[in-house]
Amino acid sequence: MEGSGRTPRRRGKETEHTIHNRKRRPRLRFRFGVIVFIWVVVFASCFGLYMFACNLFGMDPDQESSADTTEAASDTTESAPETTEPVATEPEATETEPPATTAPAENVNPLPERDAKSADYFDDCIFVGDSITVGLSTYQFVPATRVYATIGLNITRVMTETVATEYGKIPILEGIEQAQPKYVYVMLGSNGIAWLSNETMLKQYHEFTSAVQEVSPDTEIVVMSIPPVTAGRENASESPIQNSDINTYNSELLKMANEYGYHYLDINTALKGNDGKLPEADASKDGMHFNKATYEVLVDYLLRHTPL
């Protein structure tokens, strides 16, 4: 009887414990649900207030992101001019273009050797120069009407010098204007090389050739180097002339011809000997002028070294 009495009491305790646990669990679930409910209510209230405010002030929730994008684009636009500034330097490239006085690309100086022209070629030419040029007509290699030259002429007087032409005795420039030749050959400098500076002669030379092109625009200029002198003329007691000075002057003539688009005829090289001087046998007693045989060499060289 005692054993059967203990058992119910144990069962009673277990039953009371179980009942107690069952009563506590619903309270925990109830409290958690309340918290969730309150959280949902608060969230919904906040969201509702936010939407109400947006509608009240005319705001679009998407505007913030688009505004950020607009600001970024604006910043990019503002910085863009900095990358285009170097373009301003592009016009300067046109300032490096060659001047109009640059020699045409087809000009080859000194004039190279070509097939020889006939003597009729001189009918389209006028030769301007001093007594050395006069010899072309004296020995009848060139018609006198095509030779505008006088004894003792130097570069400082060529603009005003008068000569006998088929139009009468008139200034050289006026004769060229009347004739309108295809070519004007100029050989000036032998008279003056001993006392005039190269700067002075070249300045006067260019003034003359420019004037020729003004009065006869279609005329082509052929600049002739001045010829060498003999060793005797270099050592003369009166009016000596040095071949070294001649060479320097001729080099400047070549530069001028290249700069302004003239042809350059190098008769100096054709006439001097191996020693760089005019052979005594080819010159007159003054060591400067030519004999007839030398003029023959000169004329042959002229006809074999013409412009195109």
Image (spheres, rainbow, N blue to C red):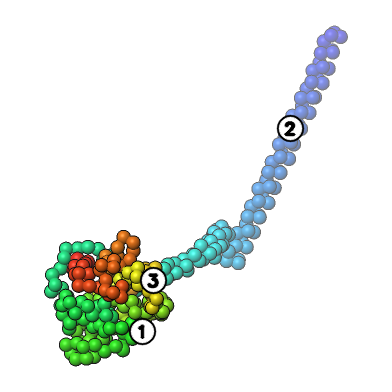
Nearer to us: label 2 or label 3: 3
Tell me what residue is drawn at x 34 percent, y 79 percent.
Answer: 191
Label 3 environment density (alpha carbons within 10 Å; few <14, some 14–19, many ≥20): few
Earlier sequence position, callout 2 versus callout 3: 2
Q: Which residue is mark 2?
A: 25
Taking 19 as reference, is 35 above or below it?
Answer: below
The quadrant the C terminus occupies is: bottom left
Residue at x 50% of width, y 66% of height: 85
Q: Quadrant of residue 161?
A: bottom left
Q: Tell me, for residue 278, which label it has, or none.
A: none
Residue 38: image location, x then y, percent? 70, 47
Q: Classify residue 7 as left or right of residue 50.
A: right
| Upstream in sequence: badge 1 or badge 2 | 2
* Residue 67 screen position, x and y as percent: 56, 61
The residue pinned by badge 3 equals 235
User: Marks 1 and 2, Cα distance to the nearest angstrom?
Assistant: 131 Å
Q: Residues within 10 Å of mark 1 (few under 14, many from 20)?
A: some
Residue holding disc 1: 156
